[in-house]
Image (cartoon, rainbow, N blue to C red):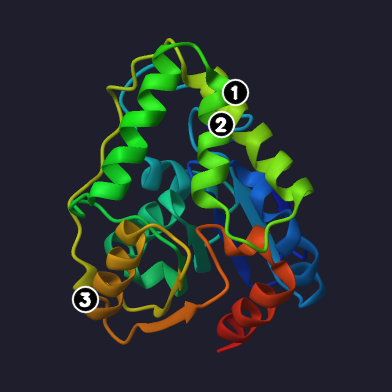
């Protein structure tokens, strides 16, 4: 099964793959779509299984391998990767397992396999679980919005994120996602130019993750955004887009 996706731009252009946060789906990259296309890139946005328009998984799967299968279906050999939060975690696995295919790697407030939880992220997860178990999916979505969007996010952005998260809950509730696997990978194997982005208003869990990624990914550059929360590409696209385009251009 191929992931639900959008692929736009010239077939002979450099491809930029955008992988979404688990709070959102591929629609979170709408503010980056036009600037990337205008800069001459081919843009691929995909929904992981159980998010957006991709059905909930019925058996074992691996997100990194799903993304590679999608790229292979179009004959895309090399590409740049931009991953937000959980999408950043998947991006790390791709860049480490298939380093010859990834030309540039941007990790935006990324998660990481085996990162030790902090009290703040554990408290959030506990509260979210209680709301979901009580059937208050709208309340759980509102909790995610309050937790992960920084001060620059306007009301319309908060509504969009709430709608994406609520849809994810509706797709996922009642299922038992026992089939997802993450394959062991070594950040030291990454050869792509790497940018690690963190937001000063994000949870400490993700700030610690950014520090780890910057220290353990060869040649990585770490940029902290003093205005940002967890989803800077949505909170202030006008501030984030130039940083992303500058990095992609090398």
Residue with the mark numbered 2:
141
Q: Separation of disc 3 and disc 2 at Cα?
A: 33 Å
Task: Give the residue at x 64% y 36%.
Answer: 162
Kindly indicate the quadrant of the structure image that contains residue 133. top left
Q: Nearer the viewer, residue 124 or 49?
A: 124
Quarter of the image with the C terminus in it = bottom right
Mark 3 nearby-residue class (10 Å; few <14, some 14–19, many ≥20):
some
**Image x and y of residue 23, in percent:** 52, 41
- Image vertical order of residue 70 relative to residue 200, above or below: above
Point 28% across, 60% down: residue:
97
Whether residue 19 appears in this view of the structure is: yes
Is the residue marked by circle 1 packed among few (<14), some (14-19), or many (20+) residues within 10 Å? some
Q: Which residue is mark 1?
A: 138
- The location of residue 228, given as percent across then percent down, is 55, 68
Mark 2 vs mark 1, CA separation in Å? 5 Å
In this rendering, would 65 be left or right of 158? left
Direction from residue 40 to residue 187 in the image, left or right? left
- Tell me the residue that label 3 is attached to: 216
Q: Badges 1 and 3: C-beta atoms under 8 Å apart? A: no
- Which quadrant of the figure has residue 137? top right
The structure residue drawn at horizontal position 64% and vertical position 55%, both measured from the top left corner, is: 44
Q: Position of residue 54 (x, y in %)?
A: 57, 29
Of 136 and 99, the residue lying toward us: 136
Q: Considering only order in the chain, which callout, 2 or 3, is on the residue closer to the N terminus? A: 2
Q: Nearer the viewer, mark 1 or mark 3?
A: 1
For the residues labelled 2 and 1, say whether their Cβ atoms are less than 8 Å apart.
yes
Is 191 placed above or below 151 here? below
**Element type at mark 1:** helix
* Foreground: disc 3 or disc 2: 2
Q: Secondary structure at mark 2?
A: helix
């Amino acid at each position: 099964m191929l992931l639900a996706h959008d692929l736009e731009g010239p077939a002979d252009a450099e491809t930029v793959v955008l992988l979404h946060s688990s709070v959102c789906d591929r629609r979170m990259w709408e503010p980056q779509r036009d600037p990337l296309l205008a800069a001459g890139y081919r843009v691929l946005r995909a929904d992981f299984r159980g998010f957006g328009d991709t059905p909930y998984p019925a058996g074992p799967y691996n997100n990194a391998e799903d993304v590679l299968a999608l790229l292979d279906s179009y004959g895309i050999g090399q590409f740049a990767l931009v991953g937000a939060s959980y999408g950043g975690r998947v991006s790390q696995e791709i860049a480490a397992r298939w380093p010859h295919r990834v030309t540039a790697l941007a990790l935006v407030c990324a998660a990481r396999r085996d990162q030790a939880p902090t009290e703040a992220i554990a408290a959030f997860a506990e509260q979210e679980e209680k709301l979901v178990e009580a059937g208050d999916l709208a309340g759980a979505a509102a909790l995610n919005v309050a937790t992960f969007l920084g001060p620059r996010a306007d009301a319309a952005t908060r509504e969009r994120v709430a709608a994406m998260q609520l849809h994810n809950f509706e797709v996922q509730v009642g299922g038992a996602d026992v089939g997802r696997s993450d394959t062991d990978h070594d950040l030291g194997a990454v050869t792509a130019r790497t940018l690690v982005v963190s937001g000063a208003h994000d949870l400490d869990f993700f700030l610690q993750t950014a520090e780890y990624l910057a220290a353990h990914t060869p040649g990585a550059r770490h940029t902290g955004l003093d205005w940002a929360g967890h989803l800077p590409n949505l909170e202030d696209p006008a501030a984030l887009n130039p940083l992303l385009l500058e990095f992609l251009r090398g």
